[in-house]
Amino acid sequence: MRRYIVAMVMVIGMSNVSAVHAGAEIVLVVNKSNPVNTLTKARVRSMILGAVKKWPTGDAVSVITTSPGDAERKSALLTYAGMSEQQFATAFLQANFKGEDRTPPKTLPNGKIIVQIVALTPGAIGFVDSADLSPMVKRVAVE
Amino acid sequence: MRRWYTIKPFPYLCAALLANFQLSAQEADRKLLEDPVVSKLLQRLADDEARIRSLEARLSSLLPPAAAVPDHGGVTASPVLAPVPTGNGEAKSSPATEPDSASALAMASMMAGDHDHAMEIPGGPVLKFRGFTDLGFGVGQASNHLVFPLGVPGHSTFTIGEFDLFMSSKISDHLSFASELVVGPSPDNSWGLDIERIQLTYRANPYFEVSGGRYHTAIGYYNTMFHHGTWFQAATGRPFMYLFEDSGGLLPVHNVGLTATGLVPGTEKLGLHWIAEVGNGRTSDRNAYTVQNFVADKNRKSFNVAAYVRPEGVPGLQVGGSIYRDRLYPDTVTPVNQTVASAYAVYGNSTWEFLNEGVLLRNASGFNHRVYNTPMMYSQVSRRFGAYRPYLRYQYVNAIAGDPVNVYRGKYAGPSFGIRYDLSDYAALKFQYNRINQTGIAALNGLETQLAFTF
């Protein structure tokens, strides 16, 4: 009985650890010169789907995520576009087929590089793990 | 989660270059060069270049002298590959000049490479292709989504759907090109080649873009959302009301001319879009090819105006309508004023699809001063359960007798239901049952199986 309890506690403990790992927070970062501090979830969805092309400042929106298949990107697509990777790819394919001008997100290998590029690019918006946050960029709140 | 030090740096650099950011400020450059990650990338690039040089040197040592010096000006026909005739008329390479297999492979590779380079415009537009097609099997009278009037074929049939090659190319920041080249089957089992869409588009900004060429008329939703590839569609084919002209469709779903569209400034949250189109319209001769690609039969042009909203707060919702006007001369003298009014409300996300459209086709004859109204509608709902998407569609068209323009006259209405199963990310198997009630004849039934895919 005691062994079962120990095993149960271990399983619960491990599941908690994996939940923390799987639930790593995806945050949005922009260039420090960008005056935007908050975005609605709907606006973020429009941005990641390529429908919004300009910031209020006039700078072109450049969405940057990690590479397809990465956990951060999967989480970002699911949270903000409500889509899987395949559904996301199909949405762009269909928009292209329809004749719409939609640019898919640019991809970089990891959050640290995304943060550096966002710090150098006025219109960039990056989807990164909260662990990759840096003072070089500004975090945008999502309402 | 992957960290920077676990990833090969070379792909990083490629991805960064592709990102095409303008890092013009010297301050930014200085900071970038001081970055340890960038330093590592640069070092890796230098290492890779050295490795490439070493490999090139090894390749040169394997090649005969004539081919050892690569020349982008053109690799001439080398004697090492020149065949010599044999006594029995067959060609055979001369043993004296026959290269070893490594050299031959290298030569073939170089020549193929040069050929590819000849087709490329450095820094210029790149033509992208995507293909769509479907294979199927139908049983019953109402089992073919491309054949119209309904009731054909009468026998169970294996079918090949449209072979659709979609091409697109970005010519400049503001100019782009798109086309759909379709090889489609006919009821007489022959193949026909059609350029279903060909559009050169100028995009000034999100508020204005204009395209010239042959396009899908912005009547309703389905006609511009789904074109010739069936893979995108939940069902096996289009609703009756949006059947293509050469399948007997009643609406001018294609047009040749100009189409302009854009977002209305200041309506980003509402997503209010406008569309204005002017084109040759449909031919007046019911026996002629319907879409007037090259020669119009009248000076007067058709025009279409449409608008729709796509509210940002309700992702997936789109509500809109359109008015299309044209004047046809079916008897070459008396005009028929044609008006097509449409309204729709659709909702779609990754799980649900709910499509509702209504169109009124109105032909006002100048001969007997009668107005012939043809109402048409469909409603479709589907929901995804993992790889499965069951769907139900009900459709109705009623083209009244005496209409001077419509090819088909009569009422046909009925349900279709089926299930789509995504075999893979880019291939879907569909099973669909159709039942169609038509004026004057017994109801038709049909069962379709379709394998639709993109490649």
Image (cartoon, coloured by chain):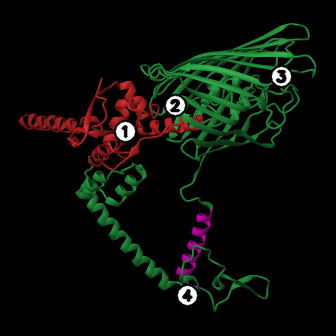
Chain colours: A red, B green
Q: Residue at x 55, y 31 (%)?
A: B420
Q: Which residue is drawn at 30% across and 31% down?
A: A35
Please report contact status of discs 4 and 1: CB closer than 8 Å, yes or no.
no
Horizontal relation, residue B189 to residue B342: left or right: right
Q: How far apart are marks 4 and 1 (CA)?
A: 53 Å
Closer to the camera in the image, B95 or A102: A102
Q: Which residue is drawn at 75% across and 18% down?
A: B325
Closer to the camera in the image, B277 or A48: B277
Chain of the residue where label 2 is placed in the rendered structure: B
Kindly identify which residue carries mark 3.
B407
The magenta region covers B99-118
Query: What's under tag 1, amino acid-wise?
Result: Gly
Q: What secondary structure is found at the residue carrying circle 2?
A: loop
- Residue B159: where, in percent of width, then height? 71, 39
Please report contact status of discs 3 and 2: CB closer than 8 Å, yes or no.
no
Kindly identify which residue carries mark 4.
B65
Q: Distance between the residues labelled 1 and 3?
A: 54 Å
Q: How far apart are marks 3 and 4 (CA)?
A: 71 Å
- Examine the structure image and report whether residue B420 is included in the region drawn in magenta: no
Query: What's under tag 2, amino acid-wise?
Result: Pro
Binning the other alpha carbons within 10 Å of mark 1 as few (below 14), some (14 to 19) or many (20 upward) gives: many
Q: What secondary structure is found at the residue carrying circle 4?
A: helix
Q: In this view, does B283 lie above or below A29?
A: above
- Residue B376: where, in percent of width, then height? 70, 15
Kindly identify which residue carries mark 1.
A123
* Dot 4 and dot 2 within a common chain: yes
Q: Distance between the residues labelled 4 and 2?
A: 57 Å
* Dot 3 and dot 2 within a common chain: yes
Please report contact status of discs 3 and 4: CB closer than 8 Å, yes or no.
no
The number of callouts visible is: 4
Kindly identify which residue carries mark 2.
B206
Query: What's under tag 4, amino acid-wise?
Result: Pro
